[in-house]
Each structure stands twice: as C-alpha cells, then as structure tokens.
Image (cartoon, rainbow, N blue to C red):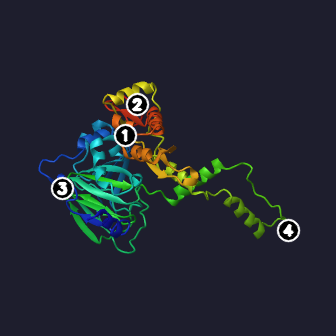
Amino acid sequence: MAPADFLHDYWQKKPLLIRNAFPDFAAPGFEPAISPEDLAGLACEEFALSRIVARERSASPHDHDRWLLRHGPFEEAMFPGMPDRDWTLLVQDVDKWDADVAGVLDAFGFLPRWRIDDIMVSFAAPGGSVGAHVDHYDVFLLQAQGHRRWQIDASPSPSLEFRDDAELKLLREFEASHDWVLGPGDMLYLPPGVPHHGVAEDACLTFSIGMRAPSAAELLGDFVDTLASEADGAMRYRDPNLVPPADASEIDADAMGRVVEALNALRMNDPERLGDWFGRFITVYRSAGAVGAHPHEEPRSRIEIEWDLQHGGSLWRHPFSRMAWRRAQARAGGGARLYVSGQEYPLPVRDAQRIANGATIDGASYARLSQAGRDCVIELLGNGHYQFAGDQMHPEDGEGR
C-alpha cells in the first residue's frame, strides 16, 4: 500500500491489520532487536520508565479479574522468580536506549518525525495482558516475537466507561468486533479511541510505536504560560470610555467586552510567534526533568572538534533530543527555524533540514553547512545534544562515560 493511500483511507479513520508488515521478523533464526532478558535489564535502570502489570484471575465468572500495577526500576533478582503466566513488563522509550530498536522507526518515514513519540516494548508471559483499554493517540502494534491475540471494538459507539476498582484505566465493558492472532512481523494499526485488548498466546515481545498527540488542555496550558511570560506589563485592563454604572456592584456587558479586548491583545495573532511557540513545545520531551541533554562538563575546543570531524570523526545526536524545523515567512527574515528540545535557532533552510533530519553529522555533512549551521552544531554539541561516535552515553545525563 502506498503511504498516501494509507494516510487517506486509514490514518485516524479506521484500524488496519497488516500481515507480514516486517517480513524479516518471521524469517527462521531471526533475533529481535532486543531480547526479553535485555528488556528486563533495562527495566532495572533508574531512569527507564517501566511497569509490570499482573492479572489475578477471578475464581467466579461473575467477578472481574484483579489487576496489579508496579512501577520500576526493578531489582534484577526479581525476574527469575516471576510466575509462568499472566504478567507483562512494559518499558517506554526503548528506541532512545537501544539503537537497533530505533532502527524500526526508519519504516515510518511517511509520518512527520515530530509526531512519533516512542517505541514501547513489552514482554508478556503466556496470558499476559494490560486489560481492555483505549488510547487517545495513533499506535502501531508490531509483533516482534511470539504470538498475541488482539481483539478490538471498531463499532461506531463503543463503551468508554472505566472501571473504578483498578489503578489502570480499564474499560468497564468490552465487546470485540474483530479478533486476530498476530505472529512475528504482523502489525496492527489503531487510530485514537478504538478499544483494544491484547493477550499473549505464548511468551512474546510486542513493539508499540506510539504517536505524540498533546491534549487540548496541554496545548492551552503551555500556550497561556508562554503568553503570560512574554506579556508586556504595561498591557492592562482599560476603560477610557467609562460611564456612570446603573449599579456600582454589577459586572456589566460593557465590562466583559473590555475583558475580552484585554485578552485578545495578548493572543498570538502573528503566525511566526505561534509557529515558534509550537516548535518549542512539540520538541520538548514529555519527561524532560528525568532525562535529556546537559552541557558537557569538559567541552572540547572548536579547533579540536573540527579537527576530529575532518579526520573521520562523527557526531551522534543524543537519543532524547527531539528536533524539528519550520520555514519562516519573508517578513520575518525568511530562512528557517530549527527547534531542539524546546529551543529555537534561526538558520538557512538547508541547514535546518540537514540538522533536523541527520541523526549523525560527519565531516562531509558538517562542511556542507553554512557558517551559521556550523555555529549551531558547535553550540548544540556543547549543550549535550551530540556526542562523538565511540563515546558511551547514558541517556539520562548526556555525558560520555
């Protein structure tokens, strides 16, 4: 299927099961990008976002199963003693920690990169599940190992009421309209709002490629904070045409009109300001306080950096550094704006494109940048958004080890 056809017919419209979407996954002897053992090891890291969901089956068909949720990090010694069935380990952002897992995203180049949030990897013992639930973002569920049964409710008006007896947001009622078993390489696309329920048929690994879809409340909250921080203190409520009120205690219609006028004066009617706000907002990692790039404690000199690049060195982008770019209007000076983890950099269009789309920068690509582009790369390196290839980096601190 051509990407344009998928986006036109299915994206945010209806589910799609894609058999053999990743043929290599089903090849004899294929090893997934990450093993269950490595996933368990990652779940023991302090800065990895991990959970274990376990199900206690009810003895009565009239009662709900009980669901238990535990948050990581976990102790390594815990995993050998885990039950043989009915539990799931989930780890967020595995693409940031594992380059092989991140390689899966190359197949999703038909989507805006800034819309992709992460690859969550889950290992489920037989019977393992997280219950029937609904997501408010697009997700691709790729089976990497083993088999998982997926049931979805694609009816026009599914029940979306949550149970009040579980820490997880589980659906009170779930009635499947479709039922499939996915094997290695099979993938299920689900638009937002489609109830689904996955249960492991055997020990299995599933990659969940999730989209970033900020809620209207998130957008409004950050937008209002930005307006308030940039507001001129001299801009205030004004009533130069005030007339004696009929009732001095009444907030009348004229007063409310002036309130609206004062608020409208703060709005970002300028598309450039609005674009810069959104570029900064969407490139901030959702848990920026826990992980992300930090300035290097002992930065190299620019002469050393450029000498290394000229002699075969290359820079690798910090895995938690999100980048995007936008064309600026001619009246705003033209060119482009590069957005990196909430910061903006004015650049020529070609520089912004090359930096935003390049996970690595070698000597040749660095030389193709303008002086402004090279200055930007040096600044980004100093702030921890790049490291030299060969250095080991822990995503939580951005420092070579």
Instruction: Give the residue pinned by disc 3.
Output: 23
Which numbered disc, 1 or 2, marks the residue closer to the eye?
A: 2
**Quadrant into which the N terminus falls:** bottom left
x and y percent of residue 9 in the render? 33, 70
Badge 1, how many Cα within 10 Å: few under 14, some, many 20+? some
Task: Look at the numbered disc 4 and give the secondary structure of its residue.
Answer: loop
**Residue at the (34%, 36%) spot, across then down:** 364
Badge 2, how many Cα within 10 Å: few under 14, some, many 20+? many
x and y percent of residue 190 in the render? 33, 63
Q: Are circles 3 and 4 on residues that touch, CB within 8 Å?
A: no
Instruction: Give the residue pinned by disc 4.
Output: 245
Which numbered disc, 3 or 4, marks the residue closer to the eye?
A: 3
x and y percent of residue 276 in the render? 54, 51
Q: CA distance from mark 3 to mark 4?
A: 76 Å
Q: CA distance from mark 4 to mark 2?
A: 65 Å
Which numbered disc, 3 or 1, marks the residue closer to the eye?
A: 3
Instruction: Give the residue pinned by disc 2.
Output: 399
The amino acid type found where label 3 is placed reads Pro
